[in-house]
Amino acid sequence: MKKFSVKIRLTVWLTLLTVLLAAVLFAFMLIVSSTVYSHSAMSQLSQTVKNNVTQISMEQDQLRFGDEFHFYQNGVSTLIYSRNEALLAGQIPVSFTAEEAFQNGLTRTVSSGDQSWLVLDLWLPMGWENGVWVRGLMEAPDHRLIARNLLPVFLIALPVFALLAALGSYRIVKRAFVPLDTISTTAAAINEARDLSRRIVLPPGRDEFSRLADTFNQLFERLERSFEAEKQFTADASHELRTPVSVIKGACEYAQKYDETLEERQETLSMIYRQAVRMSDLISQLLSITRLDQGTELTSPETVNLGELLRFLCEQQHYDQRRLTLEVPETLTVWADPALLTRLAQNLIDNAFKYGRPDGHVWVSACRSETEVLLQVRDNGIGIAPDQQKKIWQRFYQVDPSRSRENGAGLGLSMVEQIARVHGGYMTLDSVPDRGSTFTLHLPVQNMV
């Protein structure tokens, strides 16, 4: 059985179950038929005897029988006995040889040889002391005969029934497995074509196969995001690491080729160290963005006092307090990951100082409205041209590369946007060239506490 397909095995099991149910139904019909036949025979015996009793009378010490009286009718033999149980009228069936005592009004089964009889006795009083016994005899239904009559019909009908059950079961199973075949075919096509963008399409429904298809589609979507993130990480790393690796390689080749003084060697080592730090920071940022893209970044949301977080951040980073204005309430709490929220705020403030004027100013503020909490970082720096405002959220994009090549790789705003998305919020930008920019974090109401 294990070598056969699931469809064949299900068909066989359904057919066997159907045949078993047919056998149980046959046994039930046999029992019901026997019971109904017995009750019908008893009812017929009782009705015949009672009808005959109404036709018996006594006139001048003589028994009289009416026109409707029958000693044998519908398989029932009626016998008349005296009070002393002497046969007065009627003929005892030849095969009834049992000695059965009279019992008034009780229908019972009596065995006589190999045959069973139904017996019913009724006492018919006539006067104060006299009367007669009226006994009805009827052959009891032979249940074995009923079984012998039904069994050939069952044995002839069973193969036909089993064949129809097998065909019907296979058709039902085949139709039921159509969605599974679709899932298997689509999965195989995705595997062969290596196209994770394809999805399993099934008719709308909430059955098991529809839920399985939804699960597979979610799995494919997650795999697609993972592969895209891996491709993006590989492309980003190979693109951005090329320059620091080239610098390190060139410095090492120069140090090996020429005899350097101690000062030159220290400068070379410092250059290599700076490039290594830059590479380490770049890889760390790329990994963080990739995890945010994939939704695998471990977050630990908690109640965060946004005002306290911003004040602590500004103190720790040693920003020029003469150029920084912090406008936050004492208690403005949100439900967020404090580490990610700190990174978002630091990236925005760092960018504001980096792209601001040498003597410019940076404003950091936070407030709450009815539907959201807002964190704003504003500067009066160079601003961003309208045609570049959508591009700044892209990885490695820099409005002025000459001002950030040594201290950044253009990943800060991309990470900011991802962190906002992780918290269910979004970023907006309001910028005017040569007048400054305002970056705003919008957190939805469910992130408030």
Image (cartoon, rainbow, N blue to C red):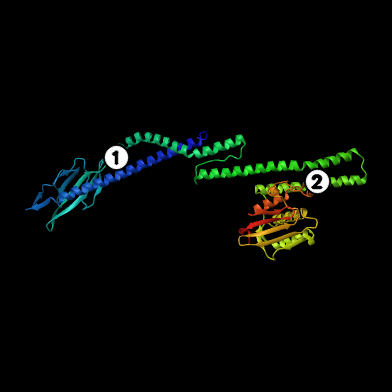
Q: Quadrant of residue 128?
A: bottom left
Q: CA distance from mark 2 to mark 1?
A: 98 Å
Query: Furthest residue to the left?
Result: 60
Q: Quadrant of residue 114?
A: top left
Question: Residue at 66% of width from left, 54% of height from top?
Answer: 428
Q: Position of residue 249 (x, y in %)?
A: 83, 40
Q: Establish if 127 lies above or below 4.
A: below
Callout 1, which amino acid? Answer: Ile
Q: Position of residue 384 (x, y in %)?
A: 72, 51
Q: Position of residue 312 (x, y in %)?
A: 74, 61
2 and 1 marks in contact (CB < 8 Å): no
- Does residue 11 show up? yes
Which residue is tagged 1? 146
Q: Nearer the viewer, residue 173 or 158?
A: 173
Callout 2, which amino acid? Answer: Ala
Q: Nearer the viewer, residue 216 or 109?
A: 216
Callout 1: few (<14), some (14-19), or many (20+) C-alpha neighbours within 10 Å? Answer: some
Q: Which label belongs to residue 214?
A: none
Question: Residue at 9% of width from left, 49% of height from top?
Answer: 64
- Does residue 305 show up? no
Q: Nearer the viewer, mark 2 or mark 1?
A: 2
Element under disc 2: helix
| Sequence-wise first label, 2 or 1 | 1
Q: Position of residue 260 (x, y in %)?
A: 92, 42
Q: Nearer the viewer, residue 373 or 190?
A: 373
Which residue is tagged 2? 276
Element under disc 1: helix
Q: Looking at the rendering, in which quadrant would you find the C terminus?
A: bottom right
Callout 2: few (<14), some (14-19), or many (20+) C-alpha neighbours within 10 Å? Answer: some
